[in-house]
Image: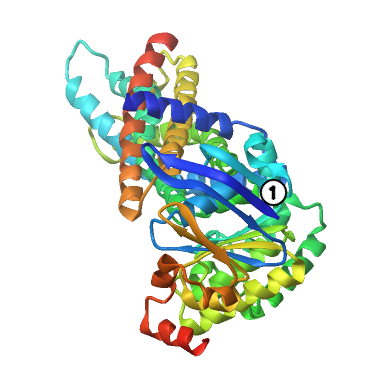
């Protein structure tokens, strides 16, 4: 579980996060949504420790990020998996080497055990064996995302962060990635945090949704509550398109 | 103020780079890759430039020493001293700053803008140490060898002038090359090249590591890395020449 308590973050005079508090639970897909510039990415980067917050607390199962030394943060990061917007696969390594990398760096497994685990993870995300030896630039965007998921889960993380996991993907592949994130979250009881403004994703997999507006937490709830919410700012954002307005009407 | 910020960031970065690697095996693997990439792949350009410069130095030395008061072996002597003292250490490093430095800055810069460095950090890897230390160590290892190869090939270039033209005889050239040889000058060149190798790799890594933005910024960082490495090499050349000679 990750608890965010009264977090304030500003860049020079501009306050980007203004007393944001929320809780991200294990075994759930926790989504941070909001318009561009609402502070989603800053909140996620603050949670990971890439930004130092001005005030407030971020607690990883009770462990305060602000009180950790650099070494402790690096140790914490070994419990974290991250799926980046652009996949961030190492382009000098093959698909298999990318998945092996975290194990070579941090695990004490034998080479055979590492290979076994990498194969398992690649099969879990349905990456065909014929592409295992290819370089990231030689596979499709959807496959890159799946390899990135395999790399993120290979060390069995307790926390999984996904930054815009569907950006640049076609709707069908987006559904596959969403389903994969949801399945993995349930299967391994991971605390998953997804930063997104993809309405399909929000409605498909959002167990716990945090809506940010201009640095404030405007609303929090699940995807079922989303349809019956009276918050004007949230409705403006989520049901901006005619299609989603019809979906809302259809859901009563 | 900007220069102070650069110096501060550079020192902090080196503080993260110059540490014992988390995984020795991974370090040695990266190190051997960098030896090949920075050292062996630089060999062709070093050979080509050195042989031509050696030949050109010989021809120019001959033209500038057309004086009956100067012994005929002066040409070989001048070629040797120029190669040993300046070309094979300093000028070669200026050239390699263009090749190796821009390569390092653009490689690390691309990794930065495609979030690969963030990915390393989030895995708990000291990205500066993992990416930069093998590059510095590999180039510092290879540079003395490149200097020795460059000097040798440069001298062969001068010999070729004697062998294939009537500008100077091989006999005179070889006497000049051996005349009043001071072995310390070899060490002087090697010591300078070690310092310059560190400057090229560390400064280029710094410019790549702190890139912000997109592809254009990577290009800019690469140019800055080469220009500033060159300035620093020339500045240090002046200091080292004063201190070591």
Assign the N terminus of chain A to one quadrant of the image.
bottom right
| Residue farthest along the bottom direction in this orientation | A250
Viewer-side residue, A25 vs A51: A25
* Residue B96 located left or right of residue B20: left
Neighbor class of circle 1 (other Cα within 10 Å; few <14, some 14-19, many 20+) is some
Residue B169 in sight in this render = yes
Residue A140 to residue A154: above or below: below
Viewer-side residue, A230 vs B27: A230
Residue B193 in sight in this render = no
Residue at x 44% of width, y 37% of height: B206
Viewer-side residue, B164 vs A96: A96
Q: Quadrant of residue B171?
A: top left
Q: Quadrant of residue B204?
A: top left
- Indicate how the structure is coloured in the image: rainbow
* Residue B230 located left or right of residue B121: left
The residue identified by callout 1 is A60
Residue B56 to residue A101: above or below: above
Residue A32 to residue A72: above or below: below
Numbered circles on residues, count: 1
Q: Residue A56: x percent and y percent?
A: 57, 40
Disc 1 secondary structure class: strand
Q: Residue B24: x percent and y percent?
A: 71, 42
| Residue farthest along the front direction in this orientation | A230
Residue at x 36% of width, y 37% of height: A13
Residue at x 66% of width, y 48% of height: A77
The chain under label 1 reads A
* Residue B22 located left or right of residue B82: right
Q: Residue A54: x percent and y percent?
A: 51, 37
Q: Residue B154: x percent and y percent?
A: 37, 34
């Amino acid at each position: 579980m990750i608890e965010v308590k009264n977090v304030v973050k500003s860049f020079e005079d501009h306050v980007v996060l203004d007393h944001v508090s929320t809780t991200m639970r294990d075994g759930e897909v926790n989504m941070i949504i909001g318009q561009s510039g609402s502070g989603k990415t800053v909140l996620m980067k603050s949670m990971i420790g890439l930004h130092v917050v001005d005030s407030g607390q971020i607690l990883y199962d009770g462990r305060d990020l602000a009180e950790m030394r650099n070494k402790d943060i690096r140790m914490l990061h070994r419990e974290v998996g991250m799926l980046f917007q652009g996949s961030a696969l190492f382009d000098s390594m093959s698909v298999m080497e990318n998945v092996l990398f975290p194990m070579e760096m941090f695990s004490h497994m034998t080479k055979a055990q590492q290979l076994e685990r990498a194969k398992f993870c690649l099969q879990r995300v349905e990456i065909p064996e014929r592409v295992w030896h290819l370089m990231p630039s030689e596979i499709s965007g959807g496959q890159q995302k799946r390899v990135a998921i395999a790399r993120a889960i290979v060390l069995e993380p307790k926390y999984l962060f996904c930054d815009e996991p569907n950006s640049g993907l076609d709707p069908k592949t987006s559904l596959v990635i969403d389903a994969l994130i949801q399945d993995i979250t349930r299967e391994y009881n991971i605390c998953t945090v997804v930063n997104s403004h993809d309405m399909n994703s929000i409605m498909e997999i959002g167990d716990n949704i945090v809506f940010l507006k201009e640095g404030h937490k405007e609303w929090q709830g699940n995807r079922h509550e989303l349809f019956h919410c009276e918050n004007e700012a949230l409705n403006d954002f989520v049901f901006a398109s005619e299609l989603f307005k019809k979906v809302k009407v259809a859901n009563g | 103020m900007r220069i102070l910020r650069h110096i501060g960031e550079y020192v902090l970065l080196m503080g993260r780079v110059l540490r014992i690697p988390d995984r020795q095996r991974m370090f040695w693997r990266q190190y051997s890759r960098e030896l090949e990439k920075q050292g062996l792949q630089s060999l062709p350009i070093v050979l080509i430039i050195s042989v031509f410069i050696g030949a050109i130095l010989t021809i120019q030395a001959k033209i500038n020493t057309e004086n009956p008061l100067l012994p005929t072996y002066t040409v070989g002597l001048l070629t040797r001293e120029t190669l040993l003292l300046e070309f094979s250490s300093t000028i070669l490093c200026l050239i390699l700053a263009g090749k190796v430095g821009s390569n390092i800055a653009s490689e690390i810069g691309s990794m930065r803008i495609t979030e690969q460095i963030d990915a390393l950090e989030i895995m708990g890897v000291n990205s500066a140490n993992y990416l930069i230390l093998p590059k510095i160590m590999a180039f510092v290892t290879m540079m003395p060898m490149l200097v020795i190869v460059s000097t040798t090939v440069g001298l062969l270039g001068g010999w070729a002038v004697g062998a294939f033209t009537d500008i100077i005889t091989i006999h005179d050239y070889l006497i000049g090359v051996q005349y009043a040889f001071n072995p310390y000058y070899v060490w002087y060149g090697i010591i300078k090249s070690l310092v310059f190798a560190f400057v090229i790799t560390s400064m280029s890594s710094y410019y790549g590591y702190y890139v912000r933005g997109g592809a254009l910024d990577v290009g800019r960082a690469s140019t800055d890395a080469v220009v500033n490495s060159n300035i620093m090499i020339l500045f240090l050349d002046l200091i080292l020449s004063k201190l070591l000679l």
